[in-house]
Amino acid sequence: MTTGKTVNLQPPAPDEDKAEARDDDNMSRPATHRKSEVRLGREVQARIGQQLRAMYDDVVSQGVPQHIADLVRRLTDQDDGVA
Amino acid sequence: MTLDPAIRDQVLSTVPSLRAFAISLCGNVDRADDLVQETLLRALAHIDSFQPGTNMPAWLFTILRNLFRSEYRKRRREVEDADGRYADMLKSHPEQPGRVEFGEFRAALAKLPPDQREALILVGASGFSYEDTATICGCAVGTIKSRVNRARTRLADLLAIDGVDDFGPDRATRAVLAGGSRN
């Protein structure tokens, strides 16, 4: 993973993940403390999944906004004289 | 710049999903669209660092996420959807089933820690694998799995899905019965 230093393609700086790393350690707590983390029923998971996708797909179904399509064309088709 | 039309098509076909992800990060349509534009500017300026045949969506999502993160650190989060455009946009789809429920769901989602929300959306809505999600978020696969699990658990609690019954004393039993041998 070495890209130019001007390109922000790298994962975030390590310090950013420190707080969450600590948080993730919670998963190794004794089982008695993990009661609220017990596996969810399949039905509950399915419901959450449906809601999540419905919300997301609502935006996806709007397709590519015109100004973004124009931008991409302008950036990639300069030689073709596309306005 | 002239670009292989196939690559350009891959970029364009990723835009709707990229935009949905951006909105989920920003909670504001205008900012999200700015973020998508900036992502595309960067991506196309550095398209040479994309290896054809690899995962274009994951590449673009990584750039967008990192841009969001660096900006987020500078400005912290602004008032969410201050202009109400996101809400308006949702209202503009009256055929949307269970719209009220939908609003509650969005509110619950907004209460999740950003890392959990982002992991859940990438896996549960964008359809990325745990591996791709880990790459996008720059962390280990196990971290993503635990974030997604905690996000789901928290959401279920916040929404009290299926009402009190599902979360009463029988919950653990029900979960075992319904979940089978799920790990």
Image: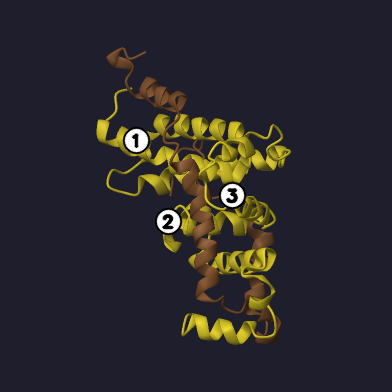
Chain colours: A brown, B yellow
Helix, strand or loop at label 3? It is helix
Which chain does tag 2 point to? B
In the displayed orientation, state which residue is furthest to the front: B95
Residue B106, above or below B167: above
User: If the image is split into quadrants, where does the N terminus of chain B sit?
Assistant: top left
Q: Which mark is residue B127?
A: 2
Residue shown at 46% from the left, 47% from the top: A57
Residue B77 percent coordinates (x, y): 71, 42
The label nearer to you, 2 versus 3, is: 3
Residue B83, above or below B150: above
Residue A26, above or below A78: below
Q: Amino acid at mark 2?
A: Gly
- Mark 2 vs 1, N-terminal side: 1
Q: Amino acid at mark 1?
A: Asp
Residue shown at 49% from the left, 39% from the top: B19
The label nearer to you, 2 versus 1, is: 2
* Drawn side of residue B119 relative to residue A77, left or right: right
- Mark 2 vs 3, N-terminal side: 3
B87, B33: nearer the viewer: B87
Residue B43, above or below B135: above
Identify the residue position indicated by label 3 in the image: B99
Q: Is residue B124 visible?
A: yes
Badge 2: residue crowd in 10 Å (few <14, some 14–19, many ≥20): some
Identify the residue position indicated by label 1 in the image: B48
